[in-house]
Image (spheres, rainbow, N blue to C red):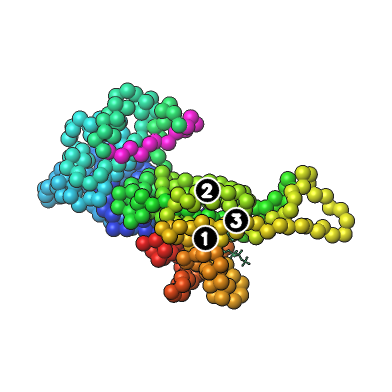
Amino acid sequence: MKNCLQLGSMLKGKKIVLGITGSIAAYKACILIRLLIKQGAEVQVVITPAGKEFITPITLSALTHKPVISDFFNQRDGSWHSHVDLGLWADAMLIAPCTASTIGKMTHGIADNMLITTYLSMKAPVLIAPAMDLDMYAHVSTQENIHLLCERGVTIIEPGSGFLASTLEGKGRMQEPEIIVDELVDFFAKRDGKLKGQRILITAGPTYEKLDPVRFIGNYSSGKMGVALAKECIAEGAEVELILGPCSLSLPKSSLLHVTNVENAAQMHHVATSLYPNCKAGIMCAAVADFTPSECADEKIKREGEQLVLRLNPTKDIAADLGKIKTPEQKLCGFALETHNALEHANEKLQRKNLDMIVMNSLQDEGAGFQCDTNKVSIITTDETVSLPLQSKQDVAREIINKFLL
Ligand code: CTP
């Protein structure tokens, strides 16, 4: 099963100057360009002479659909490449990979190539993804230069580490392209997002209600819809409290995302009720078990007798309980997955749980519901019911966030 979600267009219309320098990690620039373009960005590559030793401009221009800039003058007609115009054109300059040498030149204004002159003329924010040998990265000169760049407002995308995480030692390898793009999305979201400063609670995924040490009662929820919602909120600069039942999705790396992993309905209820009072809104996307075994056996239940009778107790309804403590300043959105009389049941839940909106999907619709990457929903409020076409869960998430929060 594929775990990745279609990402949507978190960098739509953003103009990025991508600086590439002479590191072996330059080959990863191709993946980076692809990801940036997939997110809707326009990419102009500026490469250093050393960068061209590692990757050819032909590959890069084919990916970006733009000639690569590396010299001060166009070799063919002698025309001038204007670093000043690039500085005005860009929404951000990203230098990835960024070598120790380029970091040094940036710090001290040594403008001996097109990339550094572009940097010095740059009006937009600058982000760098350092890439070098471990010792070079840890060297005091590099660290001092990075510190100075940081103080001047350059954003440093921390290199990854091999085996020794979270210490300076062992770091140096350029951060993975996926993470660089996540950080860039984060950067724009925090600066321009319509939900910046707001905290949103999202429950997602299934719950597992334990029967014995090796078995549980669960459901098919993959958590994809909830994670798609979290991504959309983050892209608008909101801080997200994601309460996630057991699932194996890869989550966006964002300082705006706080994840609490839970296993069962009781834990989800506990975390949700304690976090909701500090949130602007809640989106109850989790497929919470309605019943839990009245007791969990200490030992594995053996295959004995003619029948096994399980005794189940109702779980607490998280959405309904948040509906009870909701203040006039807060909002609450629920989901309703129905198999029959969908509209009627969804409307009843909207009232009963004191929700402001309910997103209804029907298992009768092909391509909707658990596990798949698409969904077909109707968005219901007390005023209206809007039915949306079958689309990716990411696009559905965008529509929900637009209607509910923007
Ligand atoms: N929900 C919840 N806590 C529960 C059960 C449901 O927070 N213990 C939330 C879900 O996250 C969803 C909404 O309530 O947002 C509706 O869930 P659903 O399972 O469709 O409704 P139920 O109230 O459980 O009703 P039923 O199962 O009878 O359809």
SS assignment at label 2: helix
- In three-dimensional space, the C-alpha distance between marks 1 and 3, rounded to whole angstroms, equals 21 Å
Is residue 282 visible to the viewer in this orientation of the structure? Answer: yes
Q: Amino acid at mark 1?
A: Gly
Q: Main secondary structure of the magenta part?
A: loop
Residue drawn 83% across and 50% down? 302
Q: Which residue is mark 2?
A: 274
Q: Pinpoint residue 84: horizontal percent, then vertical percent.
A: 14, 46
Left or right: where does residue 312 sit relative to residue 101?
right
Tell me whether circle 1 and circle 3 mark residues in contact (CB < 8 Å): no
Magenta run includes residue 158? yes
Q: Which residue is mark 1?
A: 323
- In three-dimensional space, the C-alpha distance between marks 2 and 1, rounded to whole angstroms, equals 13 Å
Q: Which residue is mark 3?
A: 206
The C terminus, quarter of image: bottom left
- In three-dimensional space, the C-alpha distance between marks 3 and 2, rounded to whole angstroms, equals 20 Å
Q: Nearer the viewer, residue 261 or 97?
A: 261
Which of the marked residues, 2 or 1, is nearer the chain's N terminus? 2
- Residue stretch in magenta: 154-165
Q: Residues within 10 Å of mark 2 (few under 14, many from 20)?
A: few
Q: Pinpoint residue 29: horizontal percent, then vertical percent.
A: 35, 45
Foreground mark, 1 or 3, reads 1
Q: Report the disc number at residue 291.
A: none
Which of the marked residues, 3 or 2, is nearer the chain's N terminus? 3
Magenta run includes residue 344? no
Q: Quadrant of residue 108?
A: top left
